[in-house]
């Protein structure tokens, strides 16, 4: 057991509250804040309803029937959502403070994430894919929805441009993405496959050396140990799939805290991970990563729109770079099945550059007007797929919703999952928004040749989950991780909070949020610090990246 955090909840010592006798809560809640209960999980299902190709407005809760594994589920919450097409920008913070919050994030926004999957696209087709995406964005010149552009390569996730409402800006950013293998006939198994991204951040050299996390960064450039017994070909396929899943998880967590349904347009040649099936032939570690990503996609309301970029091939041709070698389906058939699975289980649709110019428009429209239908389900003892069915009592309508979700034990009970989450957060090139938080530098001091930075982390009211059925249980993992420009660790602070709060502490948490103060001791120099808060009861995470404050001359 690690050290228990002595934190401050706006003047109330959580450690003192945890040490006192805890009685069942009898006070009424002064604010409406959702609480976490171990015996149920809330399943949110965005439902797109159209008639004649246009969104249908005005439906009521009584018009919807939700089935889980064929059994009707009472609708607990219902909302007709009209998301705004607005500019997304970081919330303002006082001087010396940094946050991961979005201005006006309490209102849903229609977000689109465009992902160029270079690691799973054969080199022969990368140049064509890039050109088609440029034309794709140019045709969307009149759209003004916030859109992010990212790529997935051998070194993982790279954010080419954060959310912008200008397609022209994205076109300019995309022109910076160059392939040094364009026009070649090499496949994705070739060791020379790499991208030259001008002006984009890289996580190639990032390292994770905290005591309780695995070195994920190293695994992205070295052969995974559990794949060594496989053939080189099979290992390469699964290694690319693992990098793809890591990048997807980082993207999902980066936008998960933003309200509303999100659309991910994924231009790719395909991968080997499928939802709701056995994934026969994959090693267990990769299957677990697949399941985790599928759960994150559903819980964060992200619909995937796979864009098939590969050319039509001879049905008898089997590409070793694009197919699970333990199956005998041709490349095109297997890829198409995986695309359909991604779309079906997230509520998106399969697109193509060549014959579906409406994909971007439909993805945006789907996220602009939909119904959010929620119900309670009982968690399973182990990861399990459950089917979802949605029926709407409105003649002549077309209904699209995700067809399943992955249920699992509470994240707080899975130690390996927590370690993995922290490791990925450290190397992520983009901050997570699942826990809304602000970091403020409070001062500096010199001691024994090292520099001490005092900091404060503040989590907004409603940003953390509390299990009131378990005596107001709050469980957090808090980390401040300092690194140099090459991503090497120079120091860190890692603390746990595991407390059962008195009722008065719970009231304060709901009204005013959570605050924690500590000191980070590192060598003199200019460094970057990543602050991480993981809510262990829900698995949600927030991160804030901040430079160390400048020290005045003469100090």
Image (cartoon, grey):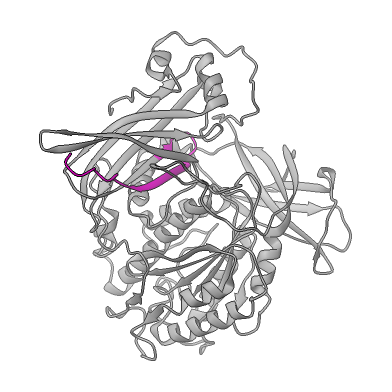
Return the x and y of residue 85 as percentages of the image width and height.
67, 59
For residue 331: magenta? no
**Which of these two is toward me, 399 or 463?**
463
Return the x and y of residue 509 as percentages of the image width and height.
52, 24
**Which of these two is toward me, 346 or 370?**
370
Q: Is residue 461 visible?
A: yes
- In-image side of 10 versus 145 (left or right): left
User: Can you tell which quarter of the image residue 24 is in?
Assistant: top right
- Among all residues in the image, which is located at the extreme front? 554
**Which of these two is toward me, 205 or 175?**
175
- In-image side of 377 versus 459 (left or right): right
Q: Residue at x 52, y 72 (%)?
A: 170
The stretch in magenta equals 533-555
Q: Residue at x 28, y 67 (%)?
A: 230
For residue 539: magenta? yes
- Among all residues in the image, which is located at the extreme right? 395
Asked if 418 appears above or below 89 in the picture, the reply is above
**Which of these two is toward me, 462 or 37?**
462
Return the x and y of residue 504 as percentages of the image width and height.
53, 14
User: The C terminus lies in which quarter of the figure?
Assistant: top left
Return the x and y of residue 339 as percentages of the image width and height.
56, 70
- In-image side of 94 versus 220 (left or right): right
Asked if 499 appears above or below 334 in the picture, the reply is above
């Amino acid at each position: 057991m690690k050290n228990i955090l002595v934190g401050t909840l706006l003047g109330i010592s959580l450690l003192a509250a945890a040490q006192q006798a805890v009685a069942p809560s009898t006070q009424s809640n002064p604010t409406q804040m959702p609480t976490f209960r171990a015996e149920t999980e809330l399943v949110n299902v965005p439902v797109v309803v159209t008639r004649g190709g246009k969104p249908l407005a005005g439906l009521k809760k009584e018009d919807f029937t939700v089935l889980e594994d064929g059994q009707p589920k009472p609708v607990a919450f219902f909302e007709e959502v009209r998301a705004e097409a607005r500019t997304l920008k970081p919330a303002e913070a006082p001087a010396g403070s940094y946050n991961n919050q979005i201005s006006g994030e309490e209102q849903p926004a229609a977000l689109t994430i465009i992902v160029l999957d270079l690691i799973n696209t054969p080199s022969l087709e990368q140049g064509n894919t890039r050109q088609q995406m440029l034309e794709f964005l140019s045709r969307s010149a009149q759209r003004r929805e916030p859109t992010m552009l990212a790529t997935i390569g051998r070194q993982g996730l790279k954010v080419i441009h954060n959310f912008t409402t200008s397609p022209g800006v994205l076109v300019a950013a995309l022109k910076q993405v160059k392939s040094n293998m364009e026009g070649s006939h090499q496949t994705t198994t070739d060791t020379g496959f790499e991208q030259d991204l001008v002006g984009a951040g890289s996580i190639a050299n990032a390292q994770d050396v905290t005591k309780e996390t695995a070195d994920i960064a190293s695994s992205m450039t070295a052969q995974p140990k559990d794949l060594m017994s496989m053939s080189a070909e099979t290992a390469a396929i699964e290694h690319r799939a693992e990098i793809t899943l890591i990048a997807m998880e980082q993207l999902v967590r980066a936008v998960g805290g933003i309200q509303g349904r999100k659309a991910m347009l994924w231009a790719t040649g395909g991968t080997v991970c499928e939802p709701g099936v056995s994934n026969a032939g994959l090693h267990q570690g990769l299957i677990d990563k697949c399941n985790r990503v599928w759960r994150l996609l559903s819980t964060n309301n992200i619909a995937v729109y796979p864009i098939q970029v590969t050319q039509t091939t001879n049905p008898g041709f089997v590409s070793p770079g694009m197919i699970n070698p333990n199956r005998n389906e041709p490349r095109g058939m297997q890829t198409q099945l995986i695309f359909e699975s991604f779309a079906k289980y997230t509520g998106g649709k399969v697109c193509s550059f060549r014959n579906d110019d409406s994909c971007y428009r439909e993805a945006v429209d789907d996220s602009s007007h939909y119904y959010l239908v929620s119900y309670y389900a009982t968690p399973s003892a182990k990861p399990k797929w459950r089917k979802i069915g949605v029926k709407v009592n409105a003649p002549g309508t077309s209904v699209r919703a995700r067809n399943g979700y992955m249920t699992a034990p509470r994240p707080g009970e899975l130690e390996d999952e927590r370690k993995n989450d922290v490791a990925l957060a450290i190397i992520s090139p983009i901050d997570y928004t699942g826990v809304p938080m602000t970091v403020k530098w409070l001062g500096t001091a010199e001691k024994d040749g090292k520099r001490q930075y005092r900091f404060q982390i503040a989590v907004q009211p409603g940003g953390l989950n509390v299990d009131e059925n378990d005596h107001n249980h709050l469980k957090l993992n808090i980390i401040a991780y300092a690194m140099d420009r090459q991503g090497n660790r120079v120091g860190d602070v890692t603390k746990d909070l595991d407390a059962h709060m008195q009722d008065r502490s719970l009231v304060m948490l709901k009204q005013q949020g959570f605050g924690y103060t500590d000191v980070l001791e590192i060598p003199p120099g200019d460094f970057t610090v990543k602050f991480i808060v993981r809510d262990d009861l829900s698995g949600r995470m927030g991160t804030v990246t901040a430079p160390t404050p400048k020290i005045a001359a003469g100090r």
